[in-house]
Image (spheres, rainbow, N blue to C red):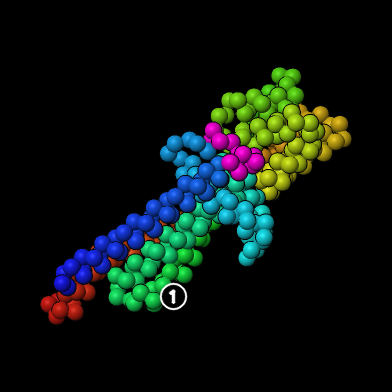
């Protein structure tokens, strides 16, 4: 009788779990379909987000499941979601991911990370003998906070890395455009040549956005200013300010680019000199580690023998 009761109890638990999973999957499929309909109203390139195997493609699909919910949270500004999404929108633009997913989709990724992180820490707490209630009250919130924060930190890091790479490519791009303009190309045509030749380059992608804005009717000055707002980089701001002032005052852009090319060359030389001057100081710590390791290899056995009394 007890065996039958245990069997029925296990069967009921299994059936309840199966029904719960089926309900969750059904809801996920419904909200995913609704998210696919709503994403059409956003400026998202579906062909890019559908690239198989890419992390952004997976994140975009996961975010579609939570898109309807996150839109309601945004409209009601629950827990300050509206301001948070506006900040993430800016970070997605700097990271070059805004064409692949929206801030609402990214919030869905963070929500999934929070649930997975909370469950992981809760399971670990159970493995170490913590009670179920204690794990839910202590472990789950900590894991949820960590799981929520990891995608946010990853987005910030991706944005900073992309802007740093653009700043690194800028001197080369200036000299490249200068050569194109010496062949009687205008500034938009010089940017177009750089974009076409440097496929996959983030600066080329930004030039493509500038050219798209110009095609939509914006002036060159406004399109370049929009690029500066997107990147929020000191080096790019200085370059774009010089170019826009030249366009506004009627100064030949080729002369502006020549001045900027000379300035960037001097900046590279100064940076190289600073690195060379500090190379000796930076080498002290690795040298200290090597010397310390040698001393430990030489004196370590002697110290062990002294402690054991064999050397005396």
Quarter of the picture containing the C terminus is bottom left
Residue lying furthest left in this view? 310
Residue 174 or residue 106, whichever sits in front: 106
Q: Quadrant of residue 18?
A: bottom left
Disc 1 target residue: 137
Which residue: 73% across, 21% down? 185
Residue lying furthest right in this view? 249
Residue 263 in the image, given as x and y percentages of width and height: 70, 40
77 above or below 64?
Answer: below
Which residue: 67% across, 56% down? 75
Residue 79 in the image, given as x and y percentages of width and height: 62, 65
- Give the extent of the magenta segment: 37-48
Residue 53 in the image, given as x and y percentages of width and height: 42, 39
Left or right of 206? Residue 285 is left
Residue 176 in the image, given as x and y percentages of width and height: 64, 28
Which residue: 49% across, 65% down? 145
Q: Quadrant of residue 76?
A: bottom right
Which type of secondary structure does the marked residue at label 1 adopt? helix
Which residue: 70% across, 31% down? 212
Can residue 212 be spotted in the picture? Answer: yes
Quarter of the picture containing the N terminus is bottom left
SS assignment for the magenta stretch, majority: helix
Residue lying furthest front in this view? 1
Q: How many marks?
A: 1
8 above or below 201?
Answer: below
Left or right of 261? Residue 12 is left
Can residue 161 be spotted in the picture? Answer: no
Label 1: how many Cα within 10 Å (few below 14, some 14–19, many 20+): few
Residue 126 or residue 10, whichever sits in front: 10
Magenta-colored stretch includes residue 41? yes
145 above or below 41?
Answer: below
């Amino acid at each position: 009788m007890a065996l039958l009761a245990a069997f029925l109890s296990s069967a009921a638990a299994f059936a309840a779990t199966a029904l719960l999973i089926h309900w969750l999957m059904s809801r996920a499929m419904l909200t995913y379909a609704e998210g696919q309909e709503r994403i059409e109203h956003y400026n998202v390139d579906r062909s890019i987000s559908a690239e198989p195997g890419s992390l952004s493609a997976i994140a975009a699909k996961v975010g579609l499941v939570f898109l309807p919910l996150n839109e309601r949270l945004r409209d009601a500004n629950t827990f300050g979601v509206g301001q948070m999404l506006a900040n993430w929108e800016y970070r997605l633009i700097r990271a070059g991911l805004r064409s692949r997913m929206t801030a609402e989709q990214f919030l869905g990724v963070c929500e999934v990370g929070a649930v997975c992180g909370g469950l992981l820490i809760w399971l670990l707490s159970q493995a170490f003998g913590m009670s179920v209630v204690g794990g839910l009250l202590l472990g789950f919130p900590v894991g949820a906070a960590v799981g929520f924060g990891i995608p946010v930190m990853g987005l910030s890091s991706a944005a900073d890395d992309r802007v740093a790479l653009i700043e690194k490519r800028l001197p080369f791009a200036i000299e490249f455009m200068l050569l194109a303009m010496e062949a009687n190309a205008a500034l938009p045509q010089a940017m177009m040549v750089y974009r076409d030749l440097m496929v996959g380059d983030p600066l080329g992608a930004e030039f493509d956005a500038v050219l798209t804005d110009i095609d939509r009717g914006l002036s060159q000055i406004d399109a370049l200013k929009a690029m500066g707002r997107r990147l929020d980089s000191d080096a790019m701001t200085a370059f774009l300010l010089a170019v826009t002032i030249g366009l506004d005052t009627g100064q030949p852009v080729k002369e502006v680019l020549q001045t900027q090319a000379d300035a960037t060359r001097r900046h590279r030389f100064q940076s190289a000199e600073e690195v060379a001057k500090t190379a000796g100081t930076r080498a002290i710590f690795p040298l200290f580690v090597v010397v310390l390791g040698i001393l430990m290899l030489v004196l370590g056995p002697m110290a062990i023998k002294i402690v054991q009394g064999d050397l005396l």
